């Protein structure tokens, strides 16, 4: 259960899910200035009715995790196109778990080779969309995971 | 453009393109044009309209990728006021038809494929292989830590060493990369920006150790910091600090390394970040004018440095708009340099450019389709008169390219060069009603953007307030939405999609590079004279603090004493701090 105001504690899970807009942090946890996908997605998430926070450029995995906790987000959407996803993505996930954000949904995207996907998925980092993916698919994926998290988490 | 604003020149130019430039010597007789106009109207009413009524057109609201509305047909009427003298001839001002008199008839474009990965040893082996195959133009890509100016043992480098290119943490690494390669005999293009001054010093250092005088070193660094803030976003310091370093590089190289091309003014990244062809054209040329002003501020003459500036453009899928973009770029550059900056030296008016096909146009779905995309983009670059070309590999939407994919990409260029017969005729699309009209449209739009940049307070301010970045983000979102809504087709993605098959092979890089590099860096630090390194870095710091000093000399000294990339860049971080970009959302 996420920390929330007193009135939210009284709500049932379902009511919370209906009430609260999805808060999502779009972040690039590494030395990677390719921000086109991240910026476009941030706008697409916003158009889909989510509350979007953008990390800005070049945060470390620590800063991303800290930001996610401080901003009380439901989802962290990670994007990297520099090949460092196998170290940076799991690192963010680990830090989130450590900082009390175990229930924060982590999705990822960028240039992710097929053979890297099973390992990331096993860690709970899903989506892993590449260039040319449709907003609709990505938004649906995020919504689906949040729905699941809110019902079973 | 860079800092000075409020000039009427851009407004006047934008207007003169609208009103058409030449009243003298137009291509067609007034009477003949009137005849064409009448004929066109008749054709529209009697032939076209009836035909379309019977079989309605699928193409409604046709427009270029930049959003310029298109008519179904172009005629002499559309270029009636374009005087032929304005198009001129190849090798003649304003170089619309090409910068050299005989273009590819004399010399084929350079097929420059860039490489660089893993450890310096890996890259050295690859470079030697390319040299054995007859290449003399080497082109090197660096990894992210190097591009941002961090050493391989920095916490921020973890997992990124040797991934997107080769890692360079000190002069030692450069010595290994060029081991057994005589720097006096090759030309080396290094895709490096924020630390371009440091890498230039290292290259010069290797030359010195090989006994090659600075004056004989040939090569290119990108060093285009303006486009870093606009698009690629790989900086270490605030814009003013980086521009000052670029200035030091210009002054140093003009004097000491006259064959060093010190700025490659890049539209490539601006386009990849989601801009339109118009924005790529306008922002890149604006950057170019910015560097011209930077050189002038430093007391150099345009003739001294303009021949060392070159351009780097993107080529993507809207075939004719891309061709028009390249042609327009040449004409704008020559025109503005002559008219606004008073340049007469012919060599300084030539817009030489390298082209790379668009990475963003590649899809991870049905990757073999990317070969076709790349071929079309390469063709546009050649028809646009490029001096050199890098073709992307079809697997690059997945990962770094495999050797087989790189080979297909190179073969694509060779097929265009040797099987199509295309190089026989110079600027074969010159005179096409459509292409000439479109070229003028792009010029007009570019001049309007120059004026808007001026109104936004000049280039530097437009960068610092995020005006240009937001313009690009806006366009990028527009493009994505058009694809999402099916207005623009991407074959295999929103059209003719099918369930994906087996993934293709990709090149794997392990942590070997990180370990090897960290070990070597530790050895370098053990073996060097620590006192001398500290003294050299202190001297460099004083040079950074003195706005009028040229920091290249103390930097060269520090690098030669094996101060690391991270240490040298760190001095700048102390003096200037880092930079946070304006909010773009």
Image (cartoon, coloured by chain):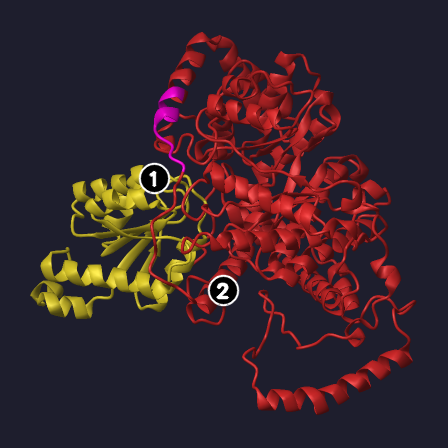
Chain colours: A yellow, B red
Q: Is residue B452 visible?
A: no
State which quarter of the image contains the N terminus of chain A.
Answer: bottom left
Residue B178 position in % (x across, y down): 57, 20
Q: Tell me the number on the disc at residue A41.
A: none
Magenta residues, start to end: B507-516
Residue at left 88%, top 60%? B85
Taking the magenta stretch, the answer to whether it contains residue B511 is: yes
Taking the magenta stretch, the answer to whether it contains residue B207 is: no
Q: Which sits in the foreground, A78 or B13? A: A78
Q: Is residue B351 visible?
A: yes
Would you name the residue on which mark 1 appears?
Answer: A60
Instruction: Give the answer, above or below, for where A86 lies relative to B128.
Output: below
Residue A116 sits in quarter: top left
Residue B562 position in % (x across, y down): 51, 15
Q: Residue furthest front?
A: B419
Q: Do badges 2 and 1 share one subunit?
A: no
Q: How many marks?
A: 2
Would you name the residue on which mark 2 appears?
Answer: B479
Residue A3 in the figure: left or right of residue B555: left
Q: Which sits in the foreground, B126 or B540? A: B126
State the SS at label 1.
Answer: loop
Residue B222 sits in quarter: top right
């Amino acid at each position: 259960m996420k920390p929330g105001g007193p009135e939210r504690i009284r709500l049932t899970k379902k009511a919370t899910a209906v009430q609260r807009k999805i808060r999502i942090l779009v972040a690039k946890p590494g030395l990677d200035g390719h921000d086109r996908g991240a910026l476009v997605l941030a706008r697409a998430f916003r158009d889909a009715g989510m509350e979007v926070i953008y990390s800005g450029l070049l945060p470390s995995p620590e800063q991303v995790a800290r930001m996610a906790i401080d901003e009380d987000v439901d989802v962290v959407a990670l994007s990297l196109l520099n090949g460092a996803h196998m170290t940076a993505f799991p690192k963010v996930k680990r830090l989130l778990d450590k900082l009390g954000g175990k229930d924060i949904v982590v999705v990822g995207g960028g240039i992710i080779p097929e053979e890297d996907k099973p390992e990331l998925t096993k860690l709970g980092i899903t989506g892993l969309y590449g260039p040319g993916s449709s907003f609709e698919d990505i938004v649906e994926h995020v919504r689906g995971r949040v729905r699941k998290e809110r019902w079973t988490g | 453009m860079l800092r000075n604003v409020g000039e009427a020149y851009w407004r006047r130019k934008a207007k003169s393109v609208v009103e058409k430039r030449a009243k003298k010597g137009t291509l067609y007789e007034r009477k003949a044009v009137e005849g064409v106009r009448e004929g066109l109207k008749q054709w529209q009413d009697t032939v076209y309209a009836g035909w379309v009524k019977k079989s309605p057109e699928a193409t409604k609201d046709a427009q270029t990728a930049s959003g310029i509305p298109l008519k179904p047909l172009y005629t002499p009427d559309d270029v009636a006021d374009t005087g032929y003298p304005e198009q001129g001839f190849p090798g003649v001002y304003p170089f619309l038809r090409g910068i050299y008199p005989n273009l590819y008839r004399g010399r084929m474009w350079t097929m420059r494929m860039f490489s660089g990965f893993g450890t310096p040893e890996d890259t050295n082996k690859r470079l030697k292989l390319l040299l054995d195959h007859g290449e003399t133009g080497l082109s090197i890509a660096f990894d992210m830590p190097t591009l941002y100016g961090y050493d391989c043992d920095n916490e921020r480098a973890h997992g990124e060493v040797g991934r997107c290119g080769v890692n360079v943490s000190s002069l030692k690494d450069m010595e290994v990369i060029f081991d057994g390669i005589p720097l006096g005999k090759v030309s080396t293009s290094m895709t490096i920006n924020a630390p371009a001054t440091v890498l230039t010093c290292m290259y010069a250092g290797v030359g010195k150790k090989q006994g090659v005088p600075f004056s004989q070193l040939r090569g290119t660094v990108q060093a285009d910091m303006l486009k870093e803030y606009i698009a690629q976003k790989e900086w270490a310091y605030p814009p003013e600090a980086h521009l000052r370093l670029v200035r030091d590089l210009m002054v140093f190289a003009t004097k000491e390394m006259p064959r060093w091309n010190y700025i490659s003014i890049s539209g490539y990244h601006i386009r990849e970040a989601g801009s339109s062809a118009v924005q790529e054209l306008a922002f890149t040329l604006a950057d170019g004018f910015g560097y011209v002003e930077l050189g002038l501020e430093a007391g150099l003459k345009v003739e001294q440095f303009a021949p060392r500036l070159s351009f780097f453009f993107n080529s993507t899928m809207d075939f004719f708009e891309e061709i028009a973009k390249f042609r327009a770029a040449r004409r704008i550059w020559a025109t503005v340099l002559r008219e606004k900056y008073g340049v007469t030296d012919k060599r300084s008016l030539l817009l030489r450019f390298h082209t790379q096909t668009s990475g963003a146009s590649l899809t991870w779905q049905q990757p073999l389709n990317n070969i076709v995309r790349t071929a079309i983009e390469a063709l546009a670059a050649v028809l646009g008169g490029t001096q050199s070309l890098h073709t992307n590999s079809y697997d690059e939407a997945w990962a770094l390219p495999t050797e087989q994919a790189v080979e297909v990409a190179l073969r694509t260029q060779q097929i265009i060069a040797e099987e199509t017969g295309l190089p026989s005729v110079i600027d074969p699309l010159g005179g096409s009603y459509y292409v000439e009209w479109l070229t003028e449209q792009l010029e007009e739009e570019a001049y309007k953007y120059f004026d808007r940049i001026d109104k936004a307070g000049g280039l530097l301010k437009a960068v610092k307030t995020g005006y240009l970045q937001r313009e690009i983000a806006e366009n990028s979102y527009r493009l994505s939405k058009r694809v999402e809504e099916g207005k623009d087709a991407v074959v295999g993605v929103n059209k003719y999609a099918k369930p994906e098959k087996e993934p293709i092979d990709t090149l794997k890089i392990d942590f070997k590079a990180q370990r090897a590099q960290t070990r070597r860096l530790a050895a370098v630090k053990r073996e060097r004279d620590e006192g001398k390194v500290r003294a050299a870095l202190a001297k460099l710091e004083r040079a950074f603090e003195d706005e009028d000093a040229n920091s290249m000399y103390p930097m060269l000294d520090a690098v030669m004493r094996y101060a690391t990339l991270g240490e040298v860049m760190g001095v700048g971080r102390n003096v200037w701090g880092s930079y946070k970009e304006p909010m773009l959302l």
